[in-house]
């Protein structure tokens, strides 16, 4: 309220509630699996090229990486960004990191300057080479370089193998050049724009050294011509267990209130699958796309989906069968490979969210899987019927459309949460509404706050209904909000509780289209029903 000092008309722009934008409700894809290299913690990638820069491409891996195949399918199917979590063995038998120690330029007795480590553990680090070159910044009195540069090479020492250059670095913490910090560790080890191949450990400023070499002689000595330093000691370790992979998945706890569509490439054991689904349910905003085991016939898949270890959850869906793609590991044309469909399916989820909205089931003729050439099994109508009753979503080949997703069911036995789009809409709305209501925490709990909450949430739900997200001919048919004295009594107010009741009319997909054709001829009615 402005200060009222003289007669006139005053405008108070803060008197009415305004729409508070919330965290984007569209889910983010998440893939957890084994890779020969790459960051250990969650990492967001926005393209297949960025993924291969961090985790390597198909040319360097054999046997095939399930994680690579899934992410390849994801981006092929229209996926945008994804969170990647590389799982490694967590005990003493886990992978080790390649490294090399470099001495400084002290002419009176060289001492360690830096340790160069591979950016992450694994055998791949043994293929990293570094060159140390004199920097371009000279001491004004002696014309001696006071900075140094690092050239990073991968899988060879030729100029074509250069992958990164770090120029005019210093071993003096806090040092600057041309107004920019150039302490080697600050630049190379930066979380946001540091090296994808190496990490540095400062040995020149070790407090345990009694007489450290003064700068700039504490910079690493230049590499002799044509003799690059190769890192060594990197090892893959023993194969990971499911517990290792599950612990990697739980790193998503770093992102609360963010919906995820989760795929664990290669995880098909029913007990393991159940544990992943339980994690999604515990988060409340996770949804799991489950891959089918390889070589499983339709009747076997029905039994698999109905086994006690597979939870009857609304936050999970199974897709079958495996898909056939052009083998990215082969240079020979015409070679194909079977792979789980999860990556392609998750890509279609995210693409549908963007183009149609979360309320649209990611299935139908518009849900074709780009890059899929065929299927492990050609399903008959009887097969599809049996699988559908077991809540298994089928992939089928449609003339003119390619391979499409022909199912939209969760594993839930209840009608209200039978469909993927319905459950994911509930997750989306819950996330958005919670985010938009957070401003009310610690506000005075009275009719002013109730009206603000009601108007803000009604504005969002109206826009969602207008975009086709809710059913109903009018907003009043699509949703209701109760936040007043009827559900906020003096007792609940004294307890510090603000109660908001919201009801929404969700959109359900047309899973079965029934056409009744009536033929009238010679005074007789003939009725034909087709689905």
Image (spheres, rainbow, N blue to C red):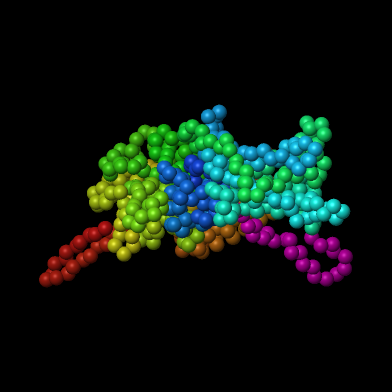
Is residue 18 part of the magenta span, yes or no?
yes
Magenta highlight range: 1-25
Q: Nearer the viewer, residue 467 or 384?
A: 384
Residue 15 placement: quadrant: bottom right
Main secondary-structure element of the magenta-colored stretch? loop
Q: Relative to residue 57, is residue 14 drawn left or right?
A: right
Q: Is residue 504 above or below residue 523?
A: above
Query: Is residue 322 a member of the stretch shown in magenta?
Result: no
Q: Where residue 13 sits: x, y (%)?
A: 74, 64
Say which residue appears at 47% left-offset and 47% top-offset.
60
User: Looking at the image, can residue 180 be seen?
Assistant: yes
Q: Nearer the viewer, residue 273 or 129?
A: 129
**In percent of the image, x 43 and y 53: which residue is there?**
73
Residue 416 image position (x, y, % from top left): 42, 47
Determine the image quadrant of residue 283: top right
Foreground residue among 437 and 66 = 66
């Amino acid at each position: 309220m402005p200060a009222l000092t003289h007669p006139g008309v005053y405008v108070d722009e803060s008197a009415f509630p305004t729409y508070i934008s919330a965290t984007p409700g569209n889910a983010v894809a998440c893939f957890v699996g084994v890779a020969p290299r790459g960051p250990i913690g969650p990492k967001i990638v926005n393209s297949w090229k960025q993924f291969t820069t961090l985790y390597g491409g198909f040319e360097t891996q054999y046997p095939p990486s399930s994680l690579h195949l899934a992410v390849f399918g994801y981006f092929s199917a229209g996926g945008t960004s994804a969170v990647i979590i590389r799982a490694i063995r967590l005990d003493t038998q886990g992978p080790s990191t390649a490294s090399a120690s470099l001495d400084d330029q002290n002419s009176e007795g060289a001492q360690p300057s830096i340790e160069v480590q591979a950016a992450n553990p694994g055998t791949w680090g043994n293929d990293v080479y570094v060159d140390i070159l004199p920097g371009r910044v000279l001491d004004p009195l002696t014309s001696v370089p006071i900075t140094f540069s690092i050239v990073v090479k991968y899988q060879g020492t030729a100029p074509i193998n250069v992958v990164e250059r770090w120029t005019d670095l210093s071993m003096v913490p806090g040092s600057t050049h041309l107004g920019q910090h150039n302490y080697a560790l600050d630049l190379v080890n930066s979380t946001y724009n540091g090296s994808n191949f190496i990490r540095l450990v400062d040995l020149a400023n070790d407090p345990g050294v009694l007489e450290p070499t003064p700068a700039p002689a504490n910079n690493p000595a230049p590499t002799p011509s044509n003799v690059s330093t190769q890192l060594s000691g990197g090892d893959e370790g023993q194969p990971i267990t499911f517990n290792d992979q599950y612990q990697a998945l739980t790193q998503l706890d770093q992102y609360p209130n963010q919906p995820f569509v989760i795929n664990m490439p290669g995880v098909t054991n029913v007990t393991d699958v159940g544990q992943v689904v339980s994690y999604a349910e515990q988060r409340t905003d996770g949804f799991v796309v489950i891959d089918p085991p390889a070589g499983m016939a339709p009747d076997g898949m029905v039994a698999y989906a109905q086994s006690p270890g597979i939870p009857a959850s609304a936050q999970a869906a199974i897709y079958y069968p495996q898909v056939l793609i052009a083998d990215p590991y082969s240079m020979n044309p015409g070679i194909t490979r079977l792979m789980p469909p999860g990556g392609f399916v998750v890509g279609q989820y995210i693409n549908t969210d963007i183009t149609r909205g979360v309320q649209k089931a990611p299935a139908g003729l518009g849900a074709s899987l780009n890059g899929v050439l065929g299927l492990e099994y050609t399903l008959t109508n009887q097969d599809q019927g049996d699988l559908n009753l077991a809540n298994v979503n089928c992939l089928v080949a449609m003339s003119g459309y390619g391979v499409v997703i022909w199912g939209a069911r969760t594993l839930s036995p209840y009608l209200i949460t039978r469909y993927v789009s319905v459950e994911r809409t509930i997750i989306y709305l819950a996330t958005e509404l919670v985010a938009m209501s957070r401003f009310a925490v610690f506000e005075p709990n009275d009719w002013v706050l109730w009206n603000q909450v009601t108007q803000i949430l009604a504005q969002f739900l109206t826009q969602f209904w207008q975009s086709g997200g809710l059913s109903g001919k009018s907003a009043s048919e699509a949703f209701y909000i109760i936040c007043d004295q009827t559900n906020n009594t003096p007792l609940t107010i004294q307890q510090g509780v603000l109660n908001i009741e919201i009801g929404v009319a969700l959109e359900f997909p047309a899973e079965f289209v029934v056409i009744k054709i009536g033929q009238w001829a010679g005074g007789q009615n003939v009725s034909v029903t087709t689905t």
